[in-house]
Amino acid sequence: MIKYFVKRIENLESACGTRRIRLIYRRVTLSRVLRISALLLFVFVLFCLAALSLGAIRIAPADVVGAIADTLLGNGPTPSEDALILFSVRLPRILFAGIIGASLSLGGVVFQALLRNPLADPYVLGISGGSALGAIIGIVLGAGSFYLGVPFLAFGGALLTVFLVFIVAGGSRGLLLDNSLLLAGVVVNSFFSAAILFSLSVVNSMELHSISFWLMGDLSGAAVKEIAVAALCLMACFVILYAQARKLNLMVQGEETALQLGVNVQRTKYILLIVTSLITAVAVSLAGIIGFVGIMVPHMMRLVFGSDHRLLLPAAALFGASFMVVADTLARIILAPAELPVGVITALCGAPYFIFLMRRKGRA
Amino acid sequence: MSIICAQNIAFRYTNKPVLDDVSFALDEARIVAVVGPNGSGKTTLLKILNATLFPNEGLMLIDGRDTRRWSRQEISRTVAIVPQESPAIFPFFAEEIVLMGRFPYLRSLAFEGKEDYKIVHDAMGRTDSLPFAHRRFNELSAGERQRVLIARALAQEPKILLLDESTVFLDLKHQAQFLSLLRELNRKQNLTVIFVTHDINLAAQNADQILLLYNGKKYAIGTPADVLTAENIREVYDVDVGIDSNPHNGSPRVTLLT
């Protein structure tokens, strides 16, 4: 199985090298970063408005805008039924989807840079799995009754996985071999999958329901308070990550190159791993395991905007947010009034994306 | 004062000794070749010189200061290395690669300014890599990539330039261009150049000094004529060579006798 993964990783690496879409070189300047961020933010807002009007109950876009205007201007004696649906049900969920999408995409960008591997993301490395296991242990032990008890255990699980993966890969001896880390992730991941399945078979049926639904990646469960915590956490982590953006550019050139160009590699790596574990843990503990977003979004953004992380980080965060809003809206409306777990949608998009990439490699 | 001073340095990878009790001092603005058979510790010595590795024993002093005491950014403004190859997994453009040479001069959130672009443009012009500045690094030929990496090292504006077999992928024209560029920088900006090579004649023709390593030990250091003797080469490389004088510049010329 490990051989199979190595093969796949190698295929994808060369697929990236022989990409056919031509990208015109443009310098990365502060104004360009701001312009592109503003554009992507605008796209995100448009998707949010569309997502607000869609659902089991259709609310016409004009009414959506009207309701927003009423609320903002403080008009209207009592909120209408539409306004209730919009602001108490849909809006929190849409923002939540955006936050989760941005978190997972950022995690993907950072891990791909750290491992110099376009296939890496928190999911592949087992960090999502470790985080989920931490959360499940929390649920089983009743940590849910403490404020932020479950996310805290999820963070513990994520951090533990990062160190476990590093120890398995021989990271204690200094600079890491890139592929060994990825393979260690695969091994650790399958161990956690087994542990999660094991815990599913021993808990009672009530807990089973809450755990299994959430394992497929589900955005319906979050409370407003939790969403606010996730948003704050995302913003703080983004600021820290963005301060490392140029260092990430150099890390991609190899750790030795980064070192000799003036990056304090070990310290940068620890900062990045801890911050990324944190956003992954928050995302997983609130929304479950959602695959493929962390691989697909950074990949697309690199195709369009190039590899400079000063542009890539905000672009991936904003586009990841839009992507997740669309995926979650599809999950809400495809079988309306029933809902799909959003992880199903992302996997349905993600798999063809990879086949597309691999086929293109075949033609080149 | 010598710009580089190695005092009894020893280095081991786990238990295998790579360098053993190596001492030498190099003056500023010299061109020094490091030669020796495979596994003699040349590349490790370069890594110790640019402080990506530190000696297990002894001291490596640059500008009279122990390399352990330099911050990463400080050392990167003083010492630059041109590696043999650089991985090209993500699609960076050639100019972006050269811009990375400005990293040690910028604050972490800063964007490159006019001055940085000017330096980068200049470095790329000198290595004849401007024609592909706006192409992807991973789509360039090995020789073109090498020129981009040389430009990146120049963009660091170092006082010491380290080269690890940096001419192997260059064609004749660009080899000549590169060597004359090195001599020009050496003469006009007092750049100290230390290059590792297997090409003894390249070393003999271009270096002021040659450091000959053998089994991790300093075997000899001195002018090409002093170091490149038939006896030394027989002892170190285990081959017989004939040595005469290069008709163009009088440097020793080594010919394999087979």
Image: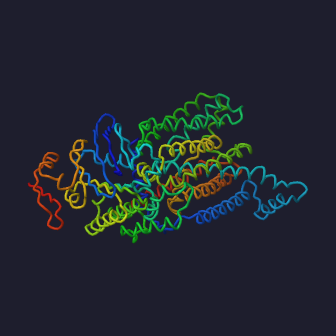
Q: Nearer the viewer, residue B168 or B125?
A: B125
Q: Residue at x 14, y 52 (%)?
A: B229
In the image, taking residue A168 as reference, residue B22 lies left or right, namely left
Q: Is residue B215 visible?
A: yes
- Image-quadrant location for residue A201: top right
Q: Which residue ends up furthest to the right in the rendered image? A: A77
Residue B34 coordinates in the image, percent (x, y): 26, 51
- Image-quadrant location for residue A131: top right
What is the tally of numbered marks visible in this picture? 0
In the image, taking residue A299 as reference, residue B46 lies left or right, namely left
Q: Is residue A356 above or below residue B69?
A: below
Residue B120 coordinates in the image, percent (x, y): 45, 65
In the image, taking residue A267 as reference, residue A66 lies left or right, namely right
Q: Residue at x 51, y 43 (%)?
A: A267
Q: Nearer the viewer, residue B157 or B174?
A: B157
Q: Residue at x 36, y 56 (%)?
A: B161
Q: Which residue ends up furthest to the bottom in the rendered image? A: B131
